[in-house]
Image (cartoon, rainbow, N blue to C red):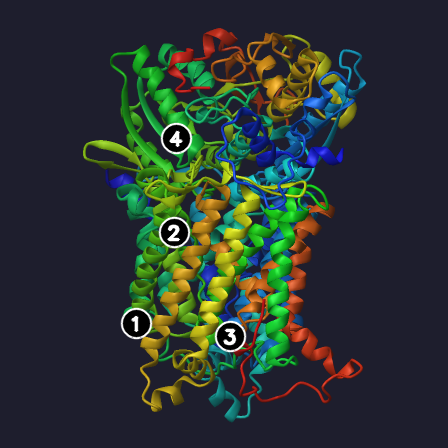
Amino acid sequence: MVAGVIQQLLDGLTLGVVYVLLAAGLSVIFGVMHVINFAHGELFALGAYFALALIAPFGGTAFFAALIVAPLIVGVIGVAIERYTVQPLYGRNPLYHILLTFGLVLVINDLIYLIWGPGASSLARPDVISGTVSVLGLGVGVYNVFIIVAGSLMAFGVWASLEYTRYGLIIRAGSQDRQMVRNLGINIDRYYSLVFGMGAALAAFAGIILAGTRQVNPEMGMSVIIPAFVIVVLGGLGSFKGAVAGGLLVGILQESILRPYFPFLEGMVIFLLMIGILLIRPQGLFGTEAPEDESGDLLTGSRGGFLDPQTRNRLGLAMILLLALVPLGAGTLYSTFIVTLMIEILIWGLFALSLDFIMGYTGLVSLGHALFYGLGAYVVAITIQDVTQSVIVAVALAIVISAAIAWFVGFLSIRVAGVYFAMITLAFAELFYNAIYRLDTIELFGEEREVTGGSEGIFGLDPFYGIAGIGVDLDSIGIFVGTTVLTGQLLFYYVALAALVVGFLLTRRMLQSPFGSVLKSIRENEQRATFLGYDTVVYKRRAFVISGALAGLSGGLYTLFTGRVFPDNAEWMVSGEVIVMVILGGMGTLYGPIIGSFTFFSLEHVLTGYTDRWRLVLGSIFVLFVIFLPRGLVSVPELLAPYLPGGPGPGPQTEPAPEDSSTGGGD
Amino acid sequence: MTPDSNTQGSRRQFIKAVTAGSVAGVTGLAGCVGDPGEAGNGEDLDDFDTVTLGILEPFTGEFAELGEERHKGNEVGIEWVNESDEYDFEFEYETFDTQTSAAAASREAEEAIQDYGADFLTGSINSSAALAVADVADSNGVVYTPGAADISITGSNCSEYVFRFETNTAQMTEVMAQWVNDELGDQIFYHYADYVYGESVRDEFEARMESLSDSYENVGETTSDEGSTDFDAFITQIQNNADDADALVVGMTGADLAIFLQQAGERDLQDDIPIVTTTGSFTPVRGGAGLQAVGTYTGVRYSHELETGDNQEFVDAYEDMHDELPDNFSRVGFESIRMVATGIQEAGSRDPDVVKDTLNDLEHETIFGTNRFRECDGQAENPVWMGELVEPEDGGDVTEVTFDLMELDGQEAIPDCEDTGCDR
């Protein structure tokens, strides 16, 4: 029994030490540069892959050399990433770093696939750190001991260099108060590359020692990034001490306590802990006081535009008419699949619009919008499966429940801002994602009933468009237009289009109301809005509820469209992708995200036809957008205007125009 | 591809329904109805040279390695059919990437049917994606031959359009349970991945043990998430329970299993308790786990050394094309395509509705000898073996797999029709 407990403790320490190394780099990078580095997991994977490449020709004996060389290479890559992609973004809102590094995740991950191919490989290691030794009658893995010792030494080395060197002193000072360091005449910016490179090298080191026992595979980065963020948030963004405490806490909690004794709670407790800490002590266990506010503005695409409102209204109307014609060409001008693809674009357009309502108009970046999308999708599926086939009831329930959960999440989350808000919404979304797996079936009135269907999801749904027996089944009615029969999905297309148009007009009307003016004033300057007597938290929460309800509607539409729902619909990549769409199109415009959705799916559809490595291209395009075109595609005409004959004259305005584009038309 | 082949899917279903008179009927804007005969595939009952095949494999993401392996088998199958005089038609095909998600898989399946005009679909490795594609195939009326082993695909979620040559978990656990009960005992500890496949291994193994032994006991269970890479805590728990159990049954596959076996080997778990797996024989699993997996017992679905049916001809064709030996997924790809081709040839039609009826209980000569897709569930009657991972004779660093511990023929291994839960 005692031996078992000691072994469990050792397991926890092994993982904890790796987490410490991973989180330390992430945390210090944030502390000094305010960069939330989503690509940290990929740097971790790169370390393991470089080690694999270095060890392959020489065998296990090269392990120790690789442990030094590979992190150095990744460190250099880290420096290059900082120089060429992160540096142009300083001075902007830190949320752009999330977006940039999310693009880098796609790029680096696909490069790994391209260079090393899919599949897992073992990292050979020397015999001296293999096998087991007997300690007090307990068979202890030598490699586990090696991880604990080597990891601790590395962490100690980093701590000592932060504590006792001049560089460390400056970095620590920068992490506490950048402006003060600058005031003292030190050019802190010069240290940024160094810190980023060091963080990358630490991640690489962690990647190698972990790969020694868990193999090297292209998904290894994805599997650690979320726990790493949890640890950084728990310990305190920017705090090395916090990373150590958080890493060991999560490692031991996960391995030594939850898995052996409360496996049902694994995956839940960590996120609940993260939410709790963010609410009670947003700066984390060991973080410095309040987060330093050096955030730049979020760059919205809503700077008036160069079309007058009337032209825009007409353009919007023309777009709707054009979209309404799409199903008519199916099967003759183009294949029916184009309509299927367009339905997905419309649904995701609505989803992106819902995120834009909160992100583009109040500046709250939700990293957990997949929660509402997934919730809507599951509520519709469960209602149709277990309660009634009525689409009206199912969709209404999806909207109401999504709105209610959004109110609850908003009630807890909106008291924190910026990156903390992003993290807390991510935690809620992960909780929901875990719950989908856990709530496979429930026992109700002594009968086992399927709820979410676990990893299989729910499928074979047969929705009925009506209520109380009055209505239609889209698959069994048809409208004949020339040679085209509009039935099934071709008819559903109009349902999706109508939902998007209604969603757009509704949000646009709201933004034209006094409520919308307050939202925009919050985005421009929340403090001033407060001084004017507005309770900004209440306004933001209301906006969040509307956003959640619309996202729930879009998720519900997805279920109706496919007739099935899977846990994939709620994973964190969904939240990432919808943010990509909002940025691609241009946030703060409502119609920009719809253009973003169109661009995203069209690119994916076209690129997958040419290459398996389409994420590399998409990621690169996204990175370029964040750096060079942060206002999104909607800003392109404005940028080109001065160069076009008959354009409206001088370059883009520098001040936001009093007339927001949202008061104009759109598509 | 002909333009007609685009007008499938729900439209075809609808027109079928119109002709059957089962539709509520809404008068049209223009009121012009095309000839229903033009829209279906009925026009090519006797005279066709090509058949369109949509191949849906995970070419990117965590299952990409297995997807590529299966696709190599697809390629050999297509070439086999196209160059053989036994078939009066050729396959034309296009590949679609199901990625890792069921959502992407169902979208790609829709694209294959609606855009490419595929009448026949094949592919997918992971159970969630295969279930999603099966649902799309069923609602669009195209024949689908999946690759995943999850029991429900030809069980509670079966479809009249779905035929599976992959050996399912029920067949695999039949031989495993018999051997474990005979040789190791009936006190079983389980570790499985918490998703469709892992759960089905536990359920199926348990059901068989209960019928084999009255004193059977489930001593304990641990579960890890799909895609886990860290099994230390579970291994500790298993070691703590090792004295009470006769065997550890592991319900995992792919990288999960490879990493588990590696970490278990590192901690000498085999010395504490015999490890029995469903898919330890797969090349990627053995490659990943290395020599740490020596001594692991495994069910075997396929071996390139088998002398059954025309397996050696397949192995030669495979080696000629790819310069390597086939493994489980490639044989599934190969034979799925060949069996569908035989069905098309026998039916004299490429209409999926005609072919699906012909395929039921049709006898084929396969790499396993005479075989068939059962009418009651669409499952192939594959033989299964029990084997062990052993040190390689050539001294390499990847284990070799034996398959001589026990063998069950196809009819012994497959569950009775009434027990499948399938109503096709």
For residue A385, the mark is none
Which of the marked residues, 2 or 1, is nearer the chain's N terminus?
1
Residue A465 seen by the camera: yes
Circle 3: element type: loop
Disc 1 target residue: A281
- In this view, the residue farthest toward the left is A445
Disc 2 target residue: A395
The residues bearing labels 2 and 1 have C-alpha atoms spaced at a distance of: 38 Å
Residue at mark 3 shares a chain with residue at mark 2: yes
Residue at mark 4 shares a chain with residue at mark 1: no
The residues bearing labels 3 and 4 have C-alpha atoms spaced at a distance of: 43 Å
Disc 4 target residue: B199
Of badges 4 and 1, nearer the viewer stands 4
Is residue B400 positioned above or below A362 on the image?
above
The residues bearing labels 4 and 2 have C-alpha atoms spaced at a distance of: 32 Å
Q: Chain of mark 2?
A: A
The residues bearing labels 4 and 1 have C-alpha atoms spaced at a distance of: 40 Å
A624 left or right, relative to A373: right
